[in-house]
């Protein structure tokens, strides 16, 4: 029965002279689909002997779908994965290393941003990104102008001062405009971990992200700084306008921190006059946080398919592909040279995010969702229950360490 | 009747009686749903008992760890919070919804004018997608300037309420639309029950001079007993499995703030599909299964007592 089906299926595929077909999986997001379709077209033109079949799934189910399919050995030849999942897949033996045939480890070491090196196991790369992303400070030009401010904040102190000036309340004291929207469920948990703690003189984790290291003066200062926007400065309120991005999009928040993938959302908002700035520095320390998706060859690709798969990944990590990606998807090139091109660095919106790449960190999460949740709880304990910052921090460190020890 | 059919009938008679043949046909028709239930219901249920004894993240192989998931579960303070939330949903939700729906059905039964229209009004929320409704309520609960409820409070000169952003108010806030949505169904069942109370009993009682309250207590409610038990069972299971409303109304579907509105089913979902700890999630489903079985068993025992 299976054989019959196979024959039937083979009959349906147009025969292009013994072509190799490889399957590629990613999640469904219009711009990403468009970019990959274009890249596949270019790749097939350069390599007429290879066909790439592009399969995509809704983002909400992607992780489950990939995990189930890979475990049942029904996966694709080339797979797009979130950087945080790679260690699981690698230790389960589901990925094949990239040989030096089309792109060498040395080339990656030298030409890509250093964050990519976490994809290297025993000196060999198992996955490579096309694009990387960082976070930045979105600011509403119109509201700044109204408040008599000319430029976005450059330091944390300026951020606090400006956010106070940008906050508005009605005669009953109800908040109508937030100076700075704080949304810990979104990128703010990254901001606290990798940026604020470092700026307060700390190091969030030690032992390759296995050990929490923020239950100290730096961590307390960072958590206090974050909660003070609500508690002391009163420039925003928990759940103001439901979500920070909604508040910013509707012109009711003057500043908001988020990833560069938020650019298309705000571009769609008419009458919203906005721009992006680098994250404010503190004590002369700049930091940022980066996350990215990678492509990897699965255990399924054998022989000429494996070769074709590696060739395809090398192409997806070429400068050419990266330019296509930033133009269509709006994510930053993972190669330094491609990112540092004049038109990208000077771009009003991408520029600040590219600056951030130079000093960005990538957290090695055990479980991003749980680790975020315990921070969210600590934040709520301080804000909603009035728990002292140090006590909330100790509890947080304890809870997160338990997750890391699992 | 020709000889052929007589012959075949006599052969059939030889092997199977009519009763046997009936049973055969019954089994044949039942086979399809039975196979379906075994493959997609019973097998996964039994399998989840096994998974609960393993450590499994889908990607790697299952690792047998005995009762470790259960030990971890019972020593996890969050699990006890979640469990007590689950029962809070039940203890608040079930009586409130039953009393409300009975009161509405009882009064609706008393008059004819606009009856169908009003009944439809109560039933429509039951037909609406839980997700869409949850989001509408989520917006109702927002703080000013966008939240409907808080804008009303401000108009009345009162202070804003935190609703979903408060550890005390989040659970009742999530529960309200869940009760509201289920009301239509319960009203409908109650009305069917009320119609089945024999009119002669009611008339006889009236002639004997029984008051409205007495009629309700002595005749209507005893006759409604099976209906009430049915609705208690159905709504108990419903409230113990509450998920859609919490997932869609709380920040990022976490059942917050600080787990204050998180029910067991959401905890299972997060363990399985956010943390990919399938064994731990399966252990929780086994606990939920046990709770549901015990409660349902007790309720059916009660139903037999008439």
Image (cartoon, coloured by chain):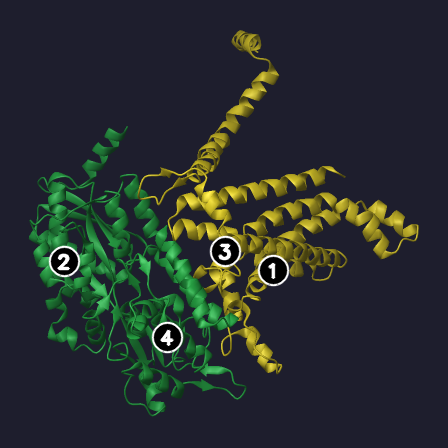
- The reply, left or right, for residue B121 in relation to residue B282 is right
Q: Among the chains, which one is yellow? A: B
Question: Could you tell me how far apart the alpha carbons at marks 2 and 3 are, in whole angstroms?
Answer: 41 Å
Observer-side mark, 2 or 4, equals 4
> Could you say where residue A221 lies in the image, as x and y percent from the top left?
37, 75
- The reply, left or right, for residue A329 in relation to residue A165 is left
Name the image quarter holding residue B222.
Answer: top right
Name the image quarter holding residue A325.
Answer: bottom left
Mark 2 residue element: loop
Residue at the spot 58% in from the left edge and 81% down from the top edge: B154
Name the image quarter holding residue A206.
Answer: bottom left
Dot label at residue B180: 1
Q: Residues within 10 Å of mark 4 (few under 14, many from 20)?
A: many
Question: Could you tell me how far apart the alpha carbons at marks 2 and 4 are, in whole angstroms?
Answer: 40 Å
Nearest to the observer: residue A34 or residue B267? B267
Dot label at residue A317: 2
Q: Residues within 10 Å of mark 1 (few under 14, many from 20)?
A: some
Q: Residue furthest front?
A: A216
The residue singled out by tag 3 in the image is: B244
Observer-side mark, 4 or 3, equals 4
Q: Are labels 1 and 4 on one chain?
A: no
Question: Could you tell me how far apart the alpha carbons at marks 1 and 3 are, in whole angstroms?
Answer: 14 Å
Nearest to the observer: residue B191 or residue A24? A24
> Could you say where residue A379 lies in the image, as x and y percent from the top left?
44, 69
Question: Could you tell me how far apart the alpha carbons at marks 4 and 3 are, in whole angstroms?
Answer: 38 Å
Question: Relative to residue A190, is residue A343 depicted above or below?
Answer: below
The residue singled out by tag 4 in the image is: A221
């Amino acid at each position: 029965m299976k054989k019959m089906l196979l024959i039937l299926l083979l009959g349906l595929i147009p025969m292009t002279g013994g072509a190799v077909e490889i399957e590629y999986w990613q999640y469904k997001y219009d711009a990403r689909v468009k970019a990959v379709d274009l890249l596949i077209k270019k790749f097939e033109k350069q390599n007429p002997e290879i066909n790439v079949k592009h399969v995509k799934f809704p983002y909400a189910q992607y992780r489950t779908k990939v995990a189930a399919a890979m475990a049942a050995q029904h996966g694709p030849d080339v797979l797009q994965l979130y950087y945080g999942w790679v260690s699981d897949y690698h230790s389960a033996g589901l990925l094949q290393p990239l040989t030096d045939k089309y792109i060498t480890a040395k080339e990656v070491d030298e030409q890509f941003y250093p964050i990519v090196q976490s994809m290297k196991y025993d000196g060999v790369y198992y996955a490579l990104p096309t694009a990387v992303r960082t976070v930045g400070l979105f600011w509403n030009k119109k509201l700044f102008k109204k408040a008599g401010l000319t430029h976005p904040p450059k330091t944390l102190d300026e951020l606090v001062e400006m956010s106070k000036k940008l906050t508005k309340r009605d005669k009953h004291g109800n908040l109508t405009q937030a100076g700075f929207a704080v949304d810990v469920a979104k990128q703010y948990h990254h901001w606290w971990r990798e940026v604020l703690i470092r700026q307060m003189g700390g190091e969030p984790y030690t032992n390759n992200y296995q050990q929490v290291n923020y239950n100290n003066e730096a961590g307390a200062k960072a958590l206090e700084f974050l909660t003070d926007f609500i508690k002391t400065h009163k420039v925003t309120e928990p759940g103001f306008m439901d979500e920070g991005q909604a508040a910013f999009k509707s012109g009711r928040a003057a500043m908001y921190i988020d990833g560069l993938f938020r650019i298309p959302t705000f571009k769609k908002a008419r009458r919203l006059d906005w721009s992006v700035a680098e994250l404010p520095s503190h004590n002369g320390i700049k930091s940022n946080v980066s996350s990215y998706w990678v492509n990897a060859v699965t255990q399924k690709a054998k022989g000429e398919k494996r070769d074709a798969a590696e060739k395809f990944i090398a192409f997806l990590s070429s400068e050419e592909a990266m330019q296509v990606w930033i133009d269509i998807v709006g994510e930053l090139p993972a190669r330094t040279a491609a990112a540092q091109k004049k038109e990208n660095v000077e771009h009003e919106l991408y520029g600040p995010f590219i600056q951030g790449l130079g000093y960005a960190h990538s957290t090695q999460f055990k479980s991003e969702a749980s680790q975020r949740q315990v921070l969210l709880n600590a934040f709520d304990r301080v804000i909603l229950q009035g728990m002292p910052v140090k006590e909330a921090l100790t509890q947080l460190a304890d809870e997160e360490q338990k997750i890391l020890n699992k | 009747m020709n000889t052929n059919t007589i012959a075949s009938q006599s052969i059939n008679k030889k092997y199977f009686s009519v009763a046997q043949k009936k049973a055969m046909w019954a089994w044949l028709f039942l086979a399809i749903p039975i196979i379906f239930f075994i493959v997609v219901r019973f097998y996964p249920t039994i399998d989840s008992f096994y998974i609960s004894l393993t450590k499994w993240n889908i990607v790697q192989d299952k690792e047998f760890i005995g009762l470790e998931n259960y030990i971890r579960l019972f020593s996890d303070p969050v699990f006890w919070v979640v469990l007590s939330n689950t029962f809070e949903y039940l203890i608040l939700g079930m009586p409130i919804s039953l009393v409300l729906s009975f009161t509405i059905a009882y009064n609706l039964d008393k008059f004819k004018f606009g009856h169908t229209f009003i009944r439809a009004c109560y039933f429509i929320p039951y037909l609406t997608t839980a997700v869409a409704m949850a989001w509408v309520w989520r917006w109702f609960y927002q703080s000013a300037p966008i939240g409907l409820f808080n804008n009303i409070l401000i108009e009345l000169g009162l202070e804003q309420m935190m609703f979903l952003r408060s550890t005390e108010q989040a659970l009742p806030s999530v529960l309200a639309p869940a009760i509201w949505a289920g009301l239509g169904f319960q009203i409908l069942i109650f009305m069917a029950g009320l119609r089945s109370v024999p009119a002669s009993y009611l008339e006889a009682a009236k002639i004997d001079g029984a008051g409205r309250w007495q009629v309700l207590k002595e005749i209507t409610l005893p006759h409604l007993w099976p209906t009430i038990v049915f609705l208690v069972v159905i709504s108990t299971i419903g409230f113990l499995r509450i998920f859609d409303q919490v997932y869609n109304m709380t920040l990022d579907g976490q059942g917050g703030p600080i787990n204050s509105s998180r029910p067991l089913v959401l905890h299972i979902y997060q363990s399985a599909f956010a943390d990919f700890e399938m064994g731990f999630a399966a252990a929780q489903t086994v606990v939920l299964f046990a709770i549901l079985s015990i409660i349902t068993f007790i309720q059916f025992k009660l139903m037999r007592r008439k």
